[in-house]
Image: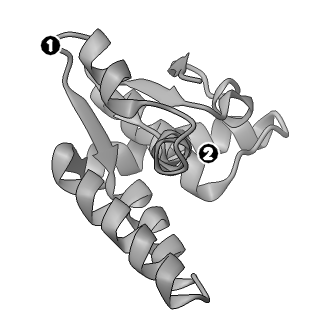
Amino acid sequence: MGRLIDTSILIESERGRLDLNAFVENCGSEDFFISVVSASELLHGVHRANEPHIRTKRAASVEGVLPQFSVLDIDLETARTHARVWAELEAKGEIIGPHDLWLAATCVAHGLVMITANVREFERVPGLTVEVWK
């Protein structure tokens, strides 16, 4: 089974609070992915930095991490899963953030484990396996 790395993990790694490489190495031959949604979130952080030195540092970090993992696009199966999970969560009054919903749908659609530091949102998603890295 592969694993999708949530944006929260990538941010924790960038801030030096998590050794991403050590966690990945401990998982052996597992396949690791990031979502195009996480790529956008990281790049958004670069563009909203007000200070040029912060923007440069973030850009270097993002551009260093993106090539390390396969980036999953949003495909039709993910869209179908997203719509179903969204409706299920909405019916229970347990909706999660829109980006997290896309990440969760990507995992469920592709049979991936969600790797996150933010379990609160993801634990509500039926059929999603969550692993917390801290």
Q: Position of residue 121 (x, y in %)?
A: 70, 36
Residue in front for this viewpoint, 4 or 94? 4
Residue placed at 67% from the left, 24% from the top? 123
Q: Is residue 1 visible?
A: no
**Quarter of the image holding residue 107?**
top left
Where on the picture, by quarter, is residue 62? Answer: bottom left
Q: Vertically, is 97 above or below 131?
A: below
Nearer to us of marks 1 and 2 is 1
Residue 94, position as x, y percentages in the image: 80, 37
Q: Residues within 10 Å of mark 2 (few under 14, many from 20)?
A: some
Q: Which residue is mark 1?
A: 29
Residue 130 placement (x, y as % from top left): 53, 19
Q: Is residue 76 left or right of residue 97?
A: left
Q: Which quadrant of the rendered structure holds the C terminus?
A: top right
Helix, strand or loop at label 2? It is: helix
In the displayed structure, 45 sits above or below 6; it is: below
Residue 58 in sight from this viewpoint: yes
Q: Secondary structure at mark 1?
A: loop
Q: Amino acid at mark 2?
A: Trp
Q: Quadrant of the N terminus?
A: top left
Question: Residue sitting at 57 percent across and 46 percent down?
Answer: 101
Q: Label 2, on which residue?
A: 86
Report the amino acid beneath label 1.
Answer: Ser
